[in-house]
Structure formats: C-alpha cells, structure tokens
Image: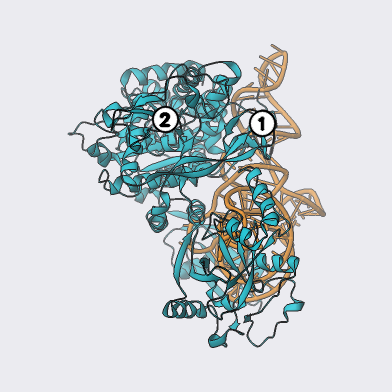
Chain colours: A cyan, B orange
Amino acid sequence: MTRRYDPSEIEPKWVKVWEDERLFEASEDPGDDRPRFYALDMFPYPSGDLHMGHAEAFSGGDAVARYQAMRGRNVLHPIGWDSFGLPAENAAIKRGIPPAEWTDANVEQQAASFRRMGMSFDWTRRLQTSDPEYYGWTQWLFLRLFENGLAYRKESPVNWCPKDQTVLANEQVIQGRCERCGTLVERRDLTQWFFKITDYAQRLLDDVDLLVDWPERVVTMQRNWIGRSEGADVTFTIEETGEEITTFTTRPDTLWGVTFFVFAVEHPAVQRLAELAGTWEQVRPLLEKARASSLASHEEADTKEGVPLGVHAVNPVNGERVPCYVAPYVLMGYGTGAIMAVPAHDQRDFEFARQHGLPVRVVIEPPGQHVDPAAMTEALPHEGVMVNSGPFDGEPSPASIAKVTAWLEREGRGRESVQFRLRDWLISRQRYWGAPIPIIHCPTDGEVAVPDDQLPVLLPDDADFQLGGESPLAQHPTWKHVTCPSCGGEAERDTDTMDTFVDSSWYFFRYCSLGYGGGPFRSEDVERWMPADQYTGGVEHAILHLLYCRFITKALHDLGMVSFVEPFPKLMNQGQVIFDGARMSKTRGNIVQPMPLVERWGADTMRLMMLFAGPFEDDIDWQLIAGDPDRRPGVTSWLGRVFAAVSDTVDRGPDGQEPLELVRLTQKTIKGVTEDMDRFRFNTAISKLMVLTNEMRATLGAGGAAGRAARALTLMLAPFAPFAAEELWRVDLGEASSTWAAAWPSFDPAMTVEELVTMIVQVDGKLRDKLEVPADISEPDALAAARDAEGARRALAGREVLKEIVRAPKLVNFVTVG
RNA sequence: GCGAGAGUGGCGGAACUGGCAGACGCGCCGGACUUAGGAUCCGGUGGCCGAAAGGCCGUGGGAGUUCGAGUCUCCCCUCUCGCACCA
C-alpha cells in the first residue's frame, strides 16, 4: 500500500526511540576499532529559543555527523551552551529574573528544540559554561596562563555611562551613547586583565598553513587581523631635551622625505614636552577630547586635526630638525605611538601637511619623471627611484628598503622591526554573569592566585543588579572580602569576570572528558578525539572566537597538555539566514522562527529547506526560498513522493526485471551523492536524490532493481531527513536497527559508466545534432557517424569543411569558415 | 581607501579538468481527480521568429585566446563581505 507521509506521526516517535536506544553516544570502548570522527558544532548562546541561523548550522553539522557514522566512524557529536554573558544580566535588571534562572530556562528550551529536530547529539556530554563544574576549570586555565606570564594586568579604557554609573560593553554603546538611557558615553581607565596573545602572533600567522580546510576568506580575515608589517625602528632625537624617541616605519627608504614628526595624543612624553615648550594649553583639549570619546565610537575624522608641540625632532639620517606635532590620527596602540611623517609618500601625512601648511619633499620619483611637490594633489605611495636622499640617490625601490635598513643598522641609527596589528586580549569584564577571575589582591602580597583546591570561585547567588556602579560583584557586601592565601591577612577578590570568549575558547576539550574531576580534561581523551575532524558554525566567528581557540590550544600545547597546535584544521561555515535582503532583527520585525516550521511541516522539512536552498556557505534569503507559509513546501512534497516510491516498491516485490536505467542511475547517484557529501555540497546531493526518486516513480514492474534503489535512497536520505529515512528503513524496509548504524551504500564504479553516450555534433561550434553512440566509439567511427547525422548534413550543405575536431565520444565539430 | 568574493530564466540555484547552458526545486500556465484545494497526479515553461520542422539570440558590459568560453586572459560596471587614520 502506498504510504502517506505524515511527519507529525513519525517524528516524535523516533525522537523517543533514538533516546531509548542511546544511539548517538560516542563509544569509548577500547575494543572499538572504528576510526573516530569528532563532529563539532559551534555551541549556541541561549538567548531564547533556537533561531534560523542555528537551524541551518545544525542541519549541516548533523548531516555530516550522520553521514560519517554511516561511513563506519565512531562519531563524537556533542552539544553544550555558551551560557554566560550580558543578556542574562539585562534580563535580571529589566525583569528581576536571576541570570541563572533565565539562562537555564533558555537552555532547556533550546535542548528541547534540538531533540525535536532529531539532532544526533551525544547528550551524555552536554555542558554549560555557566555551570560551576565548567567554569571552575575556566578559572584553572586562567591560573595556568597567569603562572606562565600569559595573563597580566594593565590600565585600559572602558566605556562608562555617567548617568547609570556603570561600565558598558562595546555592544551596549550605540553611536557613542548608552543603550539604555541614551547618555553620551565616556572613557574611563581601569586596571584590567589581559591575555598575552601577542606572544603568539607569529605562530598564529605561520600555522594558518595548517588550516588545510578552512574557507579562504576566513584565513584571510585571520591574517589581516594579526596584521604583520615589516619595516624598521628608527630613533629620532628631541632637540630640546636630547631624549630619544623611536618610531616604526614600513618605508625606511623615505626617511629623507621626513618634514615633520607626530606624537599620538596619549603618548607618555606629550604632556612633559608640551609643558616644557609652553604649548600645554593648546595640547590639553586634544587629550581631553580623546578621554571623553567612547571606545566604541569610530567617528571617522575628515580633517587632520592636530597642534604643534613646540619641540623639534632630529632626523638621524641627515641631521635635519623638523617640527613635532600632536595629532589624533597617530594611534598610541600601534607601533610606538609616534611617527616620522613623510607627506610626499603617505596619504595621511600628506593631508596633514596640506592642512597645516607643512613642506612636502619628494624622495621617490617614478623612473624618468620629475615631480613638483607644489603640484601634488595626493601622496605617491608607489615604487620608484630614490632622490634627495644623500648616499641613496638613484637607488630603485622597493629593493632600496632592505638596503636602507641594513645601512641604518650598520650606522646604529635604527634596525629591522616587525609590528603586528593584533593587540593583547582584554578579558576583564566588570560584570556579574561570567567566570570570576580567580585572583586575590593582597596589600602585602599583591596579586595572589586562588589555590587550585579552592576552585571554583563561585558567583554569589544574591547579587543586586539594580545598583549600577562598577559591577554587582564589586558592590556585593561580603563576597570580595577574603583572607590572603599567602599571608592570611585581609584581602579582596578580583571582582571582574572573564570575557565569555574565554569560556568558549576551550569547551571542545571539555567534551572529550566531560565530568573529569582531575583537570579541565584528560590528555588521553583529548588526544583520542582531537583535533576535531569538522568544525561547523557561522562566519561571524571567523576572527575572534577562532583566533582565541587557536591561541588557547597553542598555550596548552606549550604547557604540555596537548600534542597538537591547531584544534580545528577543517572548518565549515554556513551562510546567514536573512530576510528580504536584510538581517532578521526585532527592530525590523522580520524574524522567522524555525520551531513553528518544525511543528507545522516537520523537522525533516526544515532541514531540507535549509540544505537544499543553495550552497551551505551561502546566505539564505528566507523571503526568496520559503514561499507561502501555509502551502506545503516543495521538499515536503518530495518526501511524500519518496514515501510513495519506496513503499510501492516494497509492495511489488522482486519480479526479476532489471531496467538498466534504474540500476545505473542508482549506482551513479550513490557515487555522486557520496562525492557531494565529502565536499559538503548538500544542495546538489539532495537534487540527485530527487532525480533518483523521479526515476523510481517512472519505472514500473522493477522489483529487484527498484528494491535496491529504494534501500539506497532511504539510506542516503538519512543525513538530511533522518526521521523519514528511519521510518522507511525500519518500518517499510523492515530493518531492525537504525540508519545511523547502517552502512552507507556502496557502488560499483564499472556500473556508473554508460555504454551509450550522447555525442554532440557541431558545425562551426554550433549545436546541429545529437547522436547516441557507444562510449568506446573510435574517432573515425565518430566522425563518420557525425557526417551522417541529419542535422550536420543540413548545416553542411554547400559548405566546405576546412577542419574536423573529433573528441570521441563526446563531440565532433566541423569547421567551415576561416 | 585596502583586502576577499560574487554577477547565469520570474525566483533559489546546477554545469568535475574549456565541449548539449539553465540539472533539481519554487513559481507560473494548461489539464486530470475533486464539494473544495492550501492535497495529489499528468504535461508545459530562457527570449525572439515560425503553423510546424527549424532558425536566430542568450550566463553584468566590452575586447582577446580557442575549432569551441558561464568556465581562461585583460579592461570596465554593479553588488556583497571583511578591515579601515595600523605609519
């Protein structure tokens, strides 16, 4: 009897069966010699129920996990939650719900949704970063970094809302104003914790070569973020004080073109030099302005603001004295915070020079050309020949850069230098809902680590979120008051918590040893499963999350805890799910939720819609693919046809007939789908399954071949529509165990080769006929057949054939015109 | 500005190394079954000419290489993403 497809009947049933059978639990049995596969998905943040982005990412990740299980792998496919973070605290402030309660409720809802979607998670490995059992180990890792000089404190600005009297995260600052009250945000300096990721800048850059299967654009983003520049440090002398100020330049070949010198506003020498030169009154407003502006405001200056400092710098290459300026366009955070300005060859310096009436001196000219500085409208950053450069006149760049650098070094006036754009990782958050930094500040012993046996440092559960101020932890009446572990005197806990990126930088290790009490993980466990075989998640984490994971892994490697240096050599990014060309957002009111779709049409439909819409890494515009929400989606109808095709085939039974078309198509489909799965081409894999379905329905009275086709189709369907596949496999096809445990279908390569192929016949490159010819046709036979073809004869009538291109058995092309 | 990527029917998208452009699906048109269709089934569906056979045009625009270009090269246009005063 033809089966009707009713997802509401079958999906809840299999959720329960799978759970009862504990089907998706990774095997740790030493006798299990299947190769392992760690299918890792970026764990979600519990900000409500799952959204469309999760639905897409996890549909892809689950397809990979299920496919690999069927390929005979022992699959580890865990799930957890990145459950610390600001939204939980906002809920506490707005609605008075404790952060833990809000978080756990959302986690439970998402977990229920994942179950309903039939995700093949090993639920015994479930973790949550806000669980003390987890964050104790986050603190433990902090202490190991601290002991090894990789965690340190320094002053750093934070966003401060003067009205709410509180620290704001960057994402709470909207166009320079407080998200909640709209007050202009100020900058405040606080002493905060950093991880010394810059120590790893070069290795993070070099090891990009080990990321064999990362999308190229993510690799590029990582490289740009690290931002290595090669150049030279050159030391200038301040004429008035004799002090030496070092600058970094990537263009030492332009040193003879320096016409002024610029300090960053926050440069430590600025105030002293300004007071000395009597210019402090002019300089101070710049400093105050910089202090007042918020961190997050990236106002682009269209002017090159700046004031003279009143002192002079002496150029080490030619002894020239040039005026010093203070200007915000020079950043304190990069290089040395002071630059040599070469307006002729740097656009920013050029603009500054023009605005302040400073001279421009050309020292690099395009070969054979003379450039008049007065006529210039923009800087010449290009290569050329050095002029006005003393001993280096006539030297062509860019080779001159190395020569000048070597000369500087010989003369003791500078040396080769490498700078990185990457800054140290600021991990302090003046927040409650995060892992407390396990440090005690003692008046006599300074920064003292909380002893390992006192971890975790637990969050108090009675914090007041309505107070404002530095943070709920700092204002808690008792929490921070402790005795110093070293001297036993009165001391205070650090009241900052860690950036949630710290929590998420090591969770994939914990999955391997969940529940282990002797450390964050057991090295043997991690070595057994890692590096992860596949990491799936959104490009929005292309830089920070992935960079931090890479850094922590390298740090753990250096601590002797893991043998490898890269945690995820293979990365798969899904595109974003957007709506009508724009991001889905509350303010736009265009949010589409996955769960209503799952309830209405089934989880299999949701998965198929996501994966069939296009290449996995491309964005999906829901507006364009969804159609009328009340109409049955196309993929649902297809599942209905699959049900009909498979169940009809079962009814018919073997009848001995073997329609070659179906036999071959089945083999070709297995081959094609397997190749597509290996390259994550889910959309084309699904389309091939649709073609096979259509052929099965068109082929009647073909029990034997159709039965094999039905089994293959059912199994290949399992990664995409696991419920439908499971129902067909276990009910209609009568198998006892799950598709998860079944072997992926194999094919006979010989059977995928057609005996007859279509040969195209062209005249002057235009299609004139098509012929069915044997696949092994000889060139002369192909040519003869093509000449005989009616379309070719018609097109060739009255023409002279000048040339014949024969590519048996695919094509013959007659060339008649010169 | 710098860097990366992409432009193919009404729509989402196929097309391995240059060789049948538009697979598969949505939508639409026609038909069947039906009280009904938001279910199902059958047929059609790039544009233009043609009764048909067939022909011409067609992968953002323009050149080029080639017997042959969606695919390779150069120039231009548009869009998306990332970084953005990084010396």
Q: Amino acid at mark 1?
A: Gly
Q: Left or right: where does residue A320 sit relative to residue A807?
A: right
Q: Position of residue A566 (x, y in %)?
A: 35, 49
Front: mark 1 or 2: 2
Q: Which corner quadrant holds the C terminus of chain A?
A: bottom right
Total numbered badges shown on the rendered structure: 2
Q: Position of residue A87 (x, y in %)?
A: 55, 27
- At 31% from the left edge and 20% from the top edge, which residue is drawn? A21
Q: Up-down: is A4 above or below A812?
A: above
Q: Nearer the viewer, residue A378 or A277?
A: A277
Quadrant location of residue A166? Answer: top right
Q: Position of residue A369 (x, y in %)?
A: 68, 86
Q: Up-down: is A177 above or below A283?
A: above
Quadrant location of residue A13? Answer: top left
Q: Nearer the viewer, residue A343 or A166?
A: A166
Residue farthest left in this picture: A31
Q: Up-down: is A550 above or below A137?
A: below
Q: Up-down: is A475 above or below A276?
A: above
Quadrant location of residue A468? Answer: top right
Q: Left or right: where does residue A317 sit relative to residue A662?
A: right
> Which chain is indicated by disc 2?
A
- Mark 2 is surrounded, within 10 Å at the Cα level, by few (under 14), some (14 to 19) or many (20 or more) other residues, namely many
N-term mark: 1 or 2: 2
- Give the labeled residue for mark 2: A435
Residue A627: numbered disc: 1
Q: Amino acid at mark 2?
A: Ala
Real-space Cα separation, disc 1 to disc 2, in angstroms:
45 Å
Q: Are marks 1 and 2 on the same chain?
A: yes
Q: Left or right: where does residue A140 sit relative to residue A415?
A: left
